[in-house]
């Protein structure tokens, strides 16, 4: 009797159903947590994702109401809210409330860098289609090149919901690993003389410009890509809350409580959806590889585009190619990496503000690119 009870208890534990796929994913989750704590690689992203992976790979008996894919469970409610695109716009609201467009407006040339760095989206789209993915799947995979997790979730839920876990995991992982992936590519695409270019300070931006810009920029970008309206609308609303000077409480709530809560929930859901039995497939591996290619191509594209336009600029007006890599939407990590690499070669070269301009342009450009892709393939 006691022996049978012990057998029944064992069969109800996760240990009884544990297989190598769960173990691999749990190890990956632990690795992400280690990188977030020990190496400080975007801990706001990697830590909840890593722990979410561990949560999602604890095996159990079906019917307990704890599976992220089991209707009615707490995790499933969070999953559905992400799937229905509730949280990506909220994150954009918070980003807008934290954003200062002064760097972008003071040097309008950086607008072009945000657009140029989206080239990886379209290059990987073509590669994905060549590898056998549908056009809708290819578009959803390609957006990883924009290095924007919320945008990747937004487009994946519309064009390829069955690839949501793989696309979101890829996008957020590469965003977090910007300090690892970008520097070698930046150095490969530039010479030492490129890296030590000093850029002159941008013009002074007036307060009225900062208030008008989110309204004007929203009208232009939303009219160009209406499908990205929820993301762009919340981004520029958040910024207007900040710059108006009359809604400080709302701006602070958006920039703190709302974005932090949304980031935690999205991180856990993205991680928990990466179950070993569903995630460790050749299709997922291809998505991860294509995502890495897209991100690398976007980084190189931004840097090489600066080198190209420098051919037509006067010596005093030249742009340091290192800030081209910040044209991806990994805000603000990509801008910090531009500054970090630049100071390796000249400690007195301050590129951060210039890179922030490119980084903010990339934030807008990736959302616009997502809207264009949705309008074509939805």
Image: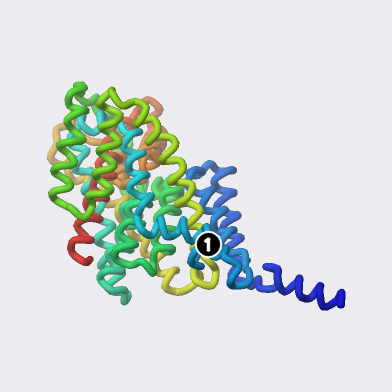
Q: Quadrant of residue 325?
A: top left
Against 303, residue 212 (above or below) is above
Name the quarter where the N terminus is drawn: bottom right
Q: Residue at x 18, y 33 (%)?
A: 213
- Side (left or right) of 231 relative to 336: left
Which colour scheme appears in the figure? rainbow
Q: Is residue 372 left or right of residue 147?
A: left
Q: Is residue 330 left or right of residue 357?
A: right
Local packing at callout 1 (Cα closer than 10 Å; few below 14, some 14-19, many 20+) is: some
Q: Which residue corresponds to mark 1?
A: 73
Residue 314 vertical placement versus 125 (above, below): above
Residue 117 appearing in the image: no
Residue at position x 60%, y 67% from top?
64
Can you tell which quarter of the image residue 326 is in?
A: top left
Residue 194 spot, x, y in % from top left: 29, 39
Secondary structure of the residue carrying numbered label 1: loop
Q: Residue 270, position in %: x, y?
A: 46, 57
Q: Is residue 100 visible?
A: yes
Pick out the residue farthest to the front.
Answer: 72
Q: Is residue 248 above or below residue 366?
A: above
- Quadrant where the C terminus lies? bottom left
- The residue under the point 60% across, 54% down is 30
Question: In terms of depth relative to the viewer, which is nearer, 120 or 220?
Answer: 220
Residue at 33% x, 40% y is 93
Could you say which is closer to the camera, residue 38 or residue 339? Answer: 38
Q: Residue 152: x percent and y percent?
A: 34, 56
Q: Is residue 222 or residue 321 the one in the foreground?
A: 222
Q: How many marks?
A: 1
- Residue 235 percent location from the top left of the image: 28, 41
Q: Nearer the viewer, residue 180 or 4?
A: 4
């Amino acid at each position: 009797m006691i022996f049978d009870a012990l057998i029944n208890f064992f069969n109800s534990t996760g240990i009884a159903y544990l297989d190598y796929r769960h173990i691999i994913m749990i190890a990956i989750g632990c690795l992400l947590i280690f990188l977030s704590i020990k190496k400080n690689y975007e801990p706001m992203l990697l830590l909840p994702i890593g722990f979410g992976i561990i949560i999602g790979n604890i095996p159990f008996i079906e019917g307990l109401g704890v599976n992220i894919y089991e209707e009615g469970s707490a995790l499933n409610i969070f999953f559905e809210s992400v799937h229905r695109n509730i949280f990506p716009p909220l994150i954009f609201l918070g980003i807008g409330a934290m954003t200062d467009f002064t760097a972008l407006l003071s040097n309008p040339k950086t607008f072009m860098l945000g657009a140029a760095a989206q080239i990886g989206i379209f290059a990987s789209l073509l590669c994905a289609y060549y590898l056998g993915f549908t056009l809708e799947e290819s578009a959803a995979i390609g957006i990883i090149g924009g290095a924007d997790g919320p945008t990747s979730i937004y487009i994946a839920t519309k064009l390829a919901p069955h690839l949501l876990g793989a696309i979101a995991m890829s996008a957020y992982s590469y965003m977090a690993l910007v300090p690892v992936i970008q520097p070698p590519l930046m150095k490969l695409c530039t010479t030492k003389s490129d890296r030590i270019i000093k850029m002159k300070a941008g013009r002074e931006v007036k307060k009225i410009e900062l208030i008008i810009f989110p309204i004007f920029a929203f009208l232009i970008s939303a009219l160009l890509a209406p499908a990205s309206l929820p993301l762009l609308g919340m981004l520029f609303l958040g910024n207007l809350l900040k710059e108006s000077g009359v809604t400080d409480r709302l701006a602070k709530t958006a920039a703190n409580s709302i974005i932090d809560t949304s980031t935690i929930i999205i991180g856990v859901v993205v991680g928990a959806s990466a179950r070993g039995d569903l995630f460790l497939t050749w299709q997922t591996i291809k998505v991860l590889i294509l995502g890495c290619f897209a991100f690398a191509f976007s980084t190189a594209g931004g840097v090489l585009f600066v080198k190209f336009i420098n051919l037509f600029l006067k010596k005093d007006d030249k742009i340091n190619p290192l800030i081209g890599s910040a044209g991806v939407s990994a805000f603000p990590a990509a801008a910090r990496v531009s500054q970090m690499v630049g100071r390796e070669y000249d400690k007195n070269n301050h590129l951060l503000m210039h890179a922030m301009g490119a980084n903010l342009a990339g934030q807008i450009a990736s959302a616009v690119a997502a809207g264009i892709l949705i309008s074509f393939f939805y």
